[in-house]
Image (cartoon, rainbow, N blue to C red):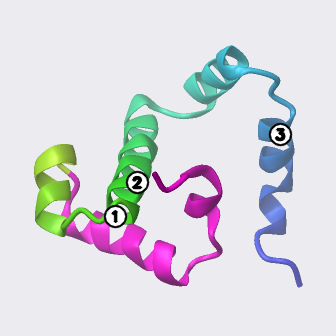
Amino acid sequence: MEKHTEFKELYDAVLSLENEEQCKLFFEDICTIKELETMSQRLEVAKMLIGGSTFNEIVAATGASTTTISRVNRCLNYGDGGYKLVIKKD
């Protein structure tokens, strides 16, 4: 059985967006500000981990908890590679 098939409609909706403005409008409607902040923070944490930053540096720069940083780090090391699809290593 395919993982997360219940999310297909959401994935299809995101894939139907044609530009950044449409993406902004969709995410601002479907997410709370806090949810958008959380997702943005996780993406920044992932970028910093990929770039070699330490947990302490990431906490100082982003305000993310060590629990969040650990969760993102676990995804980078053992997840499905989603972060790495959108983050290019410099």
> What is the spatial separation of the Cα atoms under label 2 and label 3, in whole angstroms?
23 Å
Q: Residue at x 62, y 32 (%)?
A: 30
Q: Which residues are magenta?
A: 64-90
Give coordinates of residue 36: x percent, y percent.
46, 36
Residue extending furthest toward the front: 90
Q: Quadrant of the N terminus?
A: bottom right
Q: Residue at x 29, y 65 (%)?
A: 52
Q: Which residue is mark 3?
A: 15
Q: Earlier in the sequence, mark 2 or mark 3?
A: 3
> What is the spatial separation of the Cα atoms under label 1 and label 3, in whole angstroms?
27 Å
Q: Amino acid at mark 1?
A: Leu
Give coordinates of residue 57: x percent, y percent.
14, 57
Q: Are marks 2 and 1 in contact (CB under 8 Å)?
A: yes
Nearest the camera: 71 or 49?
A: 49
Give coordinates of residue 84: x percent, y percent.
58, 62
Magenta stretch contains residue 73: yes
Q: Amino acid at mark 3?
A: Leu
Nearest the camera: 58 or 68?
A: 58
- Asked whether, in this view, residue 53 is left or right of residue 8, the answer is left
Please tell me whether residue 17 is drawn above or below residue 13 in the rendered image: above
Tell me the number on the disc at residue 2.
none
Nearest the camera: 88 or 3?
A: 88
Q: Earlier in the sequence, mark 1 or mark 3?
A: 3
Give coordinates of residue 20: x percent, y percent.
66, 21
Query: Label 2 crowding class (10 Å Cα cut-off): few <14, some 14-19, many 20+?
Result: many
Q: Amino acid at mark 2?
A: Lys
Q: Which residue is mark 2?
A: 47
Q: Which residue is mark 1?
A: 49
Looking at the magenta stretch, what is its main secondary structure? helix
